[in-house]
Image (tube, rainbow, N blue to C red):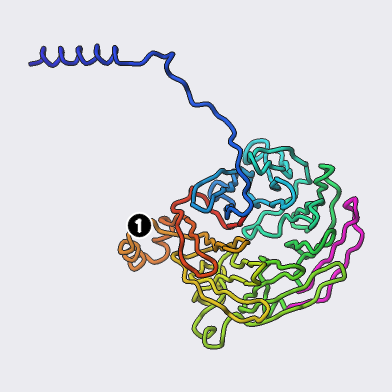
Amino acid sequence: MLMRSLRYLLCGLSLGAVAQPTLAAFVPEQAGVEVLGDHRGQNWFWIWGSNAPNMVDGRAYLFDDSGRSRGLLSTGMWSNGLVMSHRRDELYASEIYFSRGVRGTRSDVVTVYDARTLSPKYEIEIPPKRMTALISTGLSVLSDDERFLLVLNFTPAQSVSIVDLEQRRFVGEVAIPGCASLYPAGPRDFYAICGNGGFFHLRLDDQGQVAAQERTQPLFDPLQDLLLTTGSRMGDTWYFVSQQNNAYGLRMGAEGIEAAAHWSLVSDAERADGWGIAGNHGTALHVNSGRLFVLMHQDKPENYQKPGTEVWVFDVRSQKRLARIELDEQSTAIGVSQGEQPRLYSLDWVVPMPSAFTLWVYLTEGEAGLMPLLRQGINLYDADSGEHLRSIGDIPLGFMNVVAPW
């Protein structure tokens, strides 16, 4: 029996040796660069975040309307995400690197990426002061003519680095004490929201030097009704939501800033029932229709940054609610594409387990038991009807907090 088994084994080895292909027939896969098609009008979108717990390697992922992954960018330590050009096929990222990975000499750069290949074109060195924050919108912004990129700094002194994208150089730094989160308001005008409820108005000349700067009077009471910094823009008006569930429309321009609209997002009954704003990046705006999308949930007012369960849709002109869209999952951020058939995107927290198991864990261990099981996913909806279109489940592990149409 033993000899027969050995003969079978030797025979199998001999046949295996004969059947093996020659090394010359093996062709290793070669790395290459694919060229993307035109993203305009395709309902492509980006997601990005700090990539926690791997903050040294921030990520931005690109998806198309079918849910297919189109590419990714590695954007350095604790990513602030991307700024997208509308006039050039370029993307901009203000990035942080250290000479020893997580320590050593710090280097801050603005990296310009080719939007067709997602390859870096060049870097512009800036002072090693760039601000990092969970709420990443408004930390790097383009002038409306896309000549200058402004990058917010925090050391904790607050200032703005000015970058000339045409001449590919750092121009200078402007102090803005007590103010943060930038909002473009014309070819050379910018506003920064300040701690007293006012704004810092900055105007640049054609060389990127300061042409004018001033502080405005308070437009809201930060102690009674704090504005969230994630504004959504339509023309010369930026729309904000507040911790007390109000909407504010602030008109910003070269001549100054003024309050243009103010209304409550909830009725008295809804407020008493616990409805309020939600999420980290919980507003989006469809410009052509003038619809403001706001992420909402039922919870205590102090939990206004927890994930949302519904999106409420408002007409910014009439200030009336048009629709309520119930989400399939709990969302931390939303975005809306532009065009005639807009998509509503939700960046969600999910537990990829059967609902009965999830409920059992929650009932026995509470939220603490669910936290290790959480993953992130994306859901797409028809922004007009609210119909759920598709899910993109279990995206790469790492904390993402923004979804942005391209």
Question: Is 76 situated left or right of 354 in this image?
Answer: right
Query: In terms of depth relative to the viewer, which is nearer, 125 or 113?
Result: 113
Q: Residues within 10 Å of mark 1 (few under 14, many from 20)?
A: few
- The residue under the point 51% across, 66% down is 307
Quadrant hosting residue 362: bottom left
- In depth, the one of 247 and 80 nearer the eye is 247
Is the N terminus in the top left, top right, bottom left or bottom right quadrant?
Answer: top left
The quadrant in which the C terminus is found is bottom right
Count of picture labels:
1
Quadrant in the picture for residue 41: bottom right
| SS under mark 1 | loop
Give the residue drawn at x 42%, y 16%.
25
Farthest left residue?
A: 1
- The residue wearing badge 1 is 353
x then y, percent, for residue 396: 49, 47
Q: Amino acid at mark 1?
A: Met
Give the residue furthest to the front.
Answer: 340
- Residue 153: quarter of image: bottom right
Residue 172 falls inside the magenta stretch: no
**Residue 394 location (% of width, % of height):** 44, 52
User: 65 above or below 227?
Assistant: above
Q: Nearer the viewer, residue 19 or 310?
A: 19
**Residue 404: percent from the left, percent from the top?**
61, 57
Residue 329 is situated, as x and y percent measured from the top left of the image, at: 45, 64
Against 393, is 224 above or below? below
**Residues in magenta, as a range:** 197-220
